[in-house]
Amino acid sequence: MITTARVPADKSVQIAFSLNDSTELNDPDNSFPLAFPDLDQQLQPLPPCHASMESVQVFKDHCKMAKEFCDVKKEMALLEERKKKLMAELDDDEKENLDAVRLEREFRELAEENQTLISCHNHYSEQLEILRVQNQKRQGSS
C-alpha cells in the first residue's frame, strides 16, 4: 500500500530527486517541480512519503506523466492553432478557385460573344459589298 502525506496549505514543501535510479533525493539539477501550473488541481502530483521508495517512485512517475500531459496539451494547442490557420488558407484558396471558375466562365461567354460579333461583322461586310456592287451596276447602267 502506498501512503502519501497531506501538507497543510500554509506550509511550503520543496521536493527534489534525480531522474536516475539512485537513492539520492537531493539533486536539484534533476528535480521535478512540485506543481504544474497548467495542470488541474486534482491531477497535481502529491508529495511522496520519503520513507517509502515506492512512494517516491510513484511520485516521480506521476511527475513524468504530468509533464508529458502538459507537453501534449501545449502541442495540441499549437496544432489547433495551425489547423485554424490552414482552414483559413483553405477558405481563401476555395474563394480564389471560385473566382477563377467565374472568370473562366465569363471569358468563355465573352469569347463566344466575340465570335458571334465577328461573324455578324463579316456577314454584314459581305452584304454591304454586295449592295455596293449592285449600286455601282445601277449607277453604271443609268
Image (cartoon, helix red, strand yellow):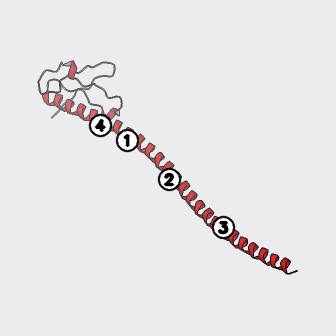
Q: CA distance from mark 2 to mark 3?
A: 36 Å
Please name whichever residue, 10 or 76, is drawn nearer the observer in this view of the structure: 76
C-beta proximity under 8 Å, tags 4 and 2: no
Q: CA distance from mark 3 to mark 4?
A: 72 Å
Residue at 57% x, 62% y is 105
For residue 51, side relative to residue 10 (left or right): left
Query: Which residue extends farthest left?
Result: 22
Q: Secondary structure at mark 4?
A: helix
Q: CA distance from mark 1 to mark 3?
A: 57 Å
Q: CA distance from mark 4 to mark 2?
A: 36 Å
Please name whichever residue, 137 or 67, is drawn nearer the observer in this view of the structure: 137
Q: CA distance from mark 1 to mark 2?
A: 22 Å
Residue 79 disc label: 1
Residue 26 disc label: none
**Which of the two marks, 3 or 4, is nearer to us in this view?**
3
Looking at marks 2 and 3 on the same chain, the residue that comes earlier in the sequence is marked by 2
Looking at marks 1 and 4 on the same chain, the residue that comes earlier in the sequence is marked by 4
Please name whichever residue, 51 or 84, is drawn nearer the observer in this view of the structure: 84
Q: Give the residue at mark 3.
A: 118
Residue 94 disc label: 2
Looking at marks 1 and 3 on the same chain, the residue that comes earlier in the sequence is marked by 1
Q: Compared with residue 3, is residue 108 higher up or lower down, i.e. above or below?
A: below
Q: Secondary structure at mark 3?
A: helix
Where residue 57 appears, as percent x and y from the top left, is 16, 30
Q: Give the residue at mark 4.
A: 69
Residue at 84% x, 78% y is 140
For residue 57, side relative to residue 125 (left or right): left
**Which of the two marks, 4 or 2, is nearer to us in this view?**
2
Where residue 72 appears, as percent x and y from the top left, is 31, 38
How many other residues sit within 10 Å of disc 2, few (<14), some (14-19) or many (≥20)? few
Q: Looking at the picture, which amino acid does disc 1 mark? A: Leu
Looking at marks 1 and 2 on the same chain, the residue that comes earlier in the sequence is marked by 1
